[in-house]
Image: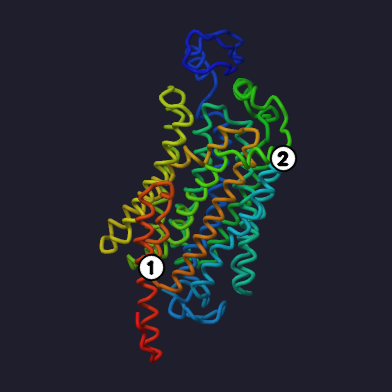
């Protein structure tokens, strides 16, 4: 099928290679959709396989966020780092360590150090070397390191940080190299559905982790969380090497009609080999900068929610580990549902010619930025309402997934041949935002010791292009300054100094 003209012109006839017949464009769309399988096709199966890879890697990365609640002796925050104790916390059979809040912040953010460093090299080589091998070996490395986390914690906190950093690099390879797949596997009018299906795995992973981690911790102990997800990753790695191929032309199991449908729809895009990267042109490109800034904004909010939702719920709702896991998982379930619906809706707008590509991307990007920011700012004011906190946490994550149909796949629209590198640069920008956000949150928690104030500060994001952000930031800054001066005054009074504050 050759897309030589814009859809919507019924007088224009094009060739459908599936049957070698000439149809009008409206007839061609109907015929090809009937001739080539849709959701049950092989390309959707591979997208689901990538979805599973994202679920596993995200689960391996985020399981520490909840296990940290039971790994750390919260009654002795200033104890020696990595000092084990024989006490059991809530009858959970695990060793407990005296890690201070800033050490916990470093451990939680160490994954992103590796993730950030690896982005640009992966983005460059993903268009040159085999994507199958890059993702397969990286998935295997991440899974093995997940198995090593419990013994590393017993040896020393430094080993945990090293394991997490290297694991982050491996997961960065999986998270970035996978987008090169859609250059050869995704027809233009199915990109939203295929990419949202696979990337929604990043949202389902935390849901599964938070849902089952509490149960595993109570019944088997927190080390088994890492062993289970590590073993699942090793098993999935074997399936990856068996089922995935870099090019649909080389796959032995795909049908001839589907192979023709994919290759013909991308004939103009992949007809020439990749040339050298136009670095100067990319640096001068406003769309590339817009995508990078948008990724920074998205990941700032998303990583704060991922890392500190369990601690926020534990601080405000005072629930046990099992209830904490269930409540923390709900936002990701609804975000996963919304993420898949966004892919379907964005492709619907495009295939029906309701909106242009740029209008669709702008619409979902704006919704994915503004709505979570509004709901996040409201959270601290709901501390007395159990259901209010849960509902607004769900709304923050669910509306944030609108970006899956916007800025997060926009690079595939503007430069498909260099999508891997553009995605790497935007992910690098996003991970820097997440790294800064997670580290800053840990430091604020140590100084202020109020996770609600931290949430109020960290969730004022995604509105940097909106006029109202300045007013919100000023108000937040006043609140933070008041808390800081208040605690300083208390400390000075305890020291016998009469402060004039």
Between the C-alphas of marks 2 and 1, the distance is: 49 Å
* Residue 47 image position (x, y, % from top left): 56, 37
Pick the quarter of the image with the C terminus.
bottom left
The residue carrying mark 2 is 130
* Residue 252 image position (x, y, % from top left): 68, 29
Q: Which mark is residue 480?
A: 1
Mark 2 or 1, closer to the camera? 1
Q: Which residue is drawn at 65% across and 65% down?
A: 162
User: Would residue 75 be visible to someone looking at this image?
Assistant: yes
Quarter occupied by residue 498: bottom left
Label 2 crowd bin: few (<14), some (14–19), many (20+), radius 10 Å: some
Using residue 424 as the reference point, say whether residue 129 is left or right of it: right
Element at badge 2?
loop
Query: Which of the colour schemes (rainbow, by chain, secondary structure, one colour) is used?
Result: rainbow
Reading the chain from its start, which is encountered first: label 2 or label 1?
Answer: 2
Element at badge 1?
helix
Using residue 209 as the reference point, say whether residue 229 is left or right of it: right
Using residue 290 as the reference point, say whether residue 335 is left or right of it: left
């Amino acid at each position: 099928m050759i897309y030589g003209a814009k859809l919507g012109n019924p007088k224009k006839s094009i060739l459908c290679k599936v049957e070698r017949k000439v149809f009008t464009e409206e007839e061609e769309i109907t015929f090809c959709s009937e001739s080539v399988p849709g959701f049950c096709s092989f390309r959707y199966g591979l997208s689901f396989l990538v979805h599973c890879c994202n679920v596993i890697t995200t689960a391996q990365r985020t399981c520490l966020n909840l296990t940290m609640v039971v790994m750390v002796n919260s009654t002795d925050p200033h104890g020696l780092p990595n000092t084990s104790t024989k006490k059991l916390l809530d009858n959970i059979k695990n060793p407990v360590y005296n890690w201070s809040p800033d050490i916990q912040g470093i451990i939680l953010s160490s994954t992103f150090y590796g993730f950030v460093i690896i982005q640009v090299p992966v983005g460059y080589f993903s268009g040159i070397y085999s994507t199958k091998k890059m993702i397969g070996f990286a998935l295997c490395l991440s899974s093995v390191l997940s198995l090593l986390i419990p013994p590393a914690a017993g040896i020393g906190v430094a080993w945990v940080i090293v394991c997490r950093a290297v694991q982050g690099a491996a997961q960065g390879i999986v998270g970035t190299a996978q987008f090169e797949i859609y250059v050869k596997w995704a027809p233009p009018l199915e990109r939203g559905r295929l990419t949202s299906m696979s990337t929604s795995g990043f949202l389902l992973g935390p849901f599964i982790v938070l849902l089952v981690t509490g149960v595993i911790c109570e019944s088997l102990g927190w080390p088994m969380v890492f062993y289970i997800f590590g073993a699942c990753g090793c098993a999935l790695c074997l399936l990856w090497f068996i089922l995935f191929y870099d090019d649909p032309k080389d796959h032995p199991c795909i049908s001839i009609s589907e192979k023709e449908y994919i290759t013909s729809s991308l004939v103009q895009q992949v007809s020439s080999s990749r040339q050298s990267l136009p670095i100067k042109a990319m640096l001068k490109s406003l769309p590339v900068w817009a995508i990078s800034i948008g990724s920074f904004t998205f990941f700032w909010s998303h990583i704060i929610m991922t890392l500190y939702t369990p601690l926020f719920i534990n601080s405000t709702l005072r629930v046990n580990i099992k209830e904490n896991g269930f409540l923390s998982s709900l936002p990701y379930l609804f975000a996963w549902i919304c993420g898949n619906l966004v892919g379907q809706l964005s492709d619907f707008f495009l295939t029906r010619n309701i909106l242009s590509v740029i209008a669709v991307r702008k619409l979902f990007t704006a919704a994915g930025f503004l709505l979570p920011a509004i709901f996040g700012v409201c959270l601290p004011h709901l501390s007395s309402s159990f259901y209010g906190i849960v509902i607004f946490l769900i709304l923050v994550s669910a509306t944030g997934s609108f970006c899956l149909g916007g800025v997060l796949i926009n690079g595939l629209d503007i430069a498909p041949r260099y999508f891997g590198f553009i995605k790497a640069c935007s992910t690098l920008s996003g991970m820097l935002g997440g790294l800064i956000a997670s580290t800053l949150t840990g430091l604020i928690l140590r100084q202020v010791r109020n996770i609600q104030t931290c949430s109020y500060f960290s969730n004022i994001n995604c509105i940097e292009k909106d006029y109202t952000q300045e007013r919100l930031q000023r108000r937040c800054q006043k609140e933070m300054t008041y808390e800081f001066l208040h605690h300083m005054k208390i400390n000075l009074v305890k020291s016998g100094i009469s402060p004039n504050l």
